[in-house]
Image: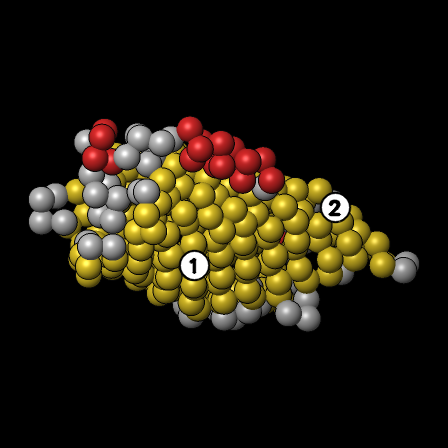
């Protein structure tokens, strides 16, 4: 995280040419083009009274934005993140592989409130995929517990707004707040990995919500800032898993926060 801050400070220091000198567009407006970047984050997933997964993650982000003369814009963006997490629940287990992939498309419009302030509301559609591998054994006392692979999919509608504030010399502060309306989810648990005679379970999740926030500092082609994502998902439906049992994905929440650096071209 310290490296990202130092890199951003160096790039800002050497980027002294103003927008007027280079013919760049108004930094208060959403800009057309590509963005690429990296993330570092803390990840915490929890099923209250059952288990949790915690650890650090590294990620890569990318986006392309289309703009129009009417200040309507649309953006397609994606994210991939990986972490090696610690499991705590029926025993403990280290080095759990955890992958997240996400794709989104949004459309919005820029509104210039004043010479130094702009609002950019947006709405869209998003897809989130998660995979972690809990295969292996954990021991509590004289009892051994065996894990399995888990696949999670969410579909949601992001509704948010970005506020851009010009602070002088082409610096812009850009906080974003977003509500993620949960449209549906599906959880696949590879219970056959346990070797205990259970069949795999696929559960539908129908209720939940999410929130996001970020505070980016922008100058020229670079931006850096902290971000937060949060999900709260309710109990899934139940499905038979064999041996006279049923399986359910319990209510759970996920919190992830970190620092992101982006370059626009």
Q: Residue at x 55, y 59 (%)?
A: 255
Q: Give whichever of 135, 76 is nearer the camera.
A: 76
Q: Give whichever of 211, 173 is nearer the camera.
A: 173
Residue behind mark 2: 94
Residue 153 as seen in the image, left or right of residue 52 = left
The mark lying in front, picked from 1 and 2, is 1
Secondary structure category for the residue under label 2: strand
- Note whether residue 151 is visible: no
Residue 185 location, x and y as percent? Answer: 42, 59
Residue 206 location, x and y as percent? Answer: 41, 68
Q: Quadrant location of residue 96?
A: top right
Residue behind mark 1: 213
Residue 181 location, x and y as percent? Answer: 35, 65
Circle 1 Cα neighbour tier, 10 Å, few/some/many (<14 / 14–19 / ≥20): some
> Cα distance, mark 1 to mark 2?
30 Å
Looking at the rendering, in which quadrant would you find the N terminus?
top right
Q: Residue at x 45, y 43 (%)?
A: 224
Q: Are the residues tagged 1 and 2 within 8 Å (C-beta)?
A: no
Q: Residue at x 48, y 43 (%)?
A: 260
Residue 52 as seen in the image, left or right of residue 35 = right
Farthest residue, direction left? 69
- Note whether residue 234 is visible: yes
Residue 40 location, x and y as percent? Answer: 56, 43
Q: Give whichever of 88, 35 is nearer the camera.
A: 35
The colour style of the image is secondary structure
Height in image: 258 above or below 205? above
Q: Residue at x 14, y 49 (%)?
A: 71
Circle 2 Cα neighbour tier, 10 Å, few/some/many (<14 / 14–19 / ≥20): some
Earlier-in-chain disc, 1 versus 2: 2
Secondary structure category for the residue under label 1: strand
Looking at the rendering, in which quadrant would you find the C terminus?
top left
């Amino acid at each position: 995280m310290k490296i990202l801050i130092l890199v951003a400070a160096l790039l800002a220091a050497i980027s002294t040419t103003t927008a007027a000198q280079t013919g760049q567009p108004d930094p208060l407006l959403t800009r057309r083009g590509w963005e690429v970047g990296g993330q570092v984050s803390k990840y915490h997933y929890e099923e209250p009274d059952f288990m949790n997964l915690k650890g650090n993650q590294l990620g890569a982000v990318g986006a392309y934005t289309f703009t129009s003369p009417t200040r309507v814009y649309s953006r397609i963006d994606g994210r991939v993140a990986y972490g090696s997490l610690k499991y705590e629940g029926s025993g403990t287990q280290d080095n759990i592989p955890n992958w997240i992939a996400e794709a989104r498309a949004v459309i919005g419009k820029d509104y210039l409130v004043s010479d130094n302030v702009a609002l950019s509301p947006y709405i869209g559609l998003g897809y989130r995929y998660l995979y972690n591998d809990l295969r292996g054994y954990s021991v509590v006392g004289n009892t051994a517990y065996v894990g399995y692979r888990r696949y999670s999919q969410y579909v949601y509608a992001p509704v948010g707004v970005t506020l851009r504030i010009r602070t002088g010399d082409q610096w812009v502060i850009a906080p974003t707040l977003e509500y993620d309306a949960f449209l549906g989810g599906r959880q696949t648990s590879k219970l056959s990995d346990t070797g205990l005679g259970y069949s795999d379970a696929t559960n539908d999740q129908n209720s939940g919500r999410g929130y996001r926030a970020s505070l980016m500092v922008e100058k020229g082609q670079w931006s850096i800032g902290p971000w937060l994502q949060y999900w709260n998902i309710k109990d899934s439906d139940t499905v038979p898993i064999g041996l006279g049992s049923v399986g359910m994905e319990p209510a759970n929440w996920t919190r992830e926060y970190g620092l992101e650096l982006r370059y626009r071209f």
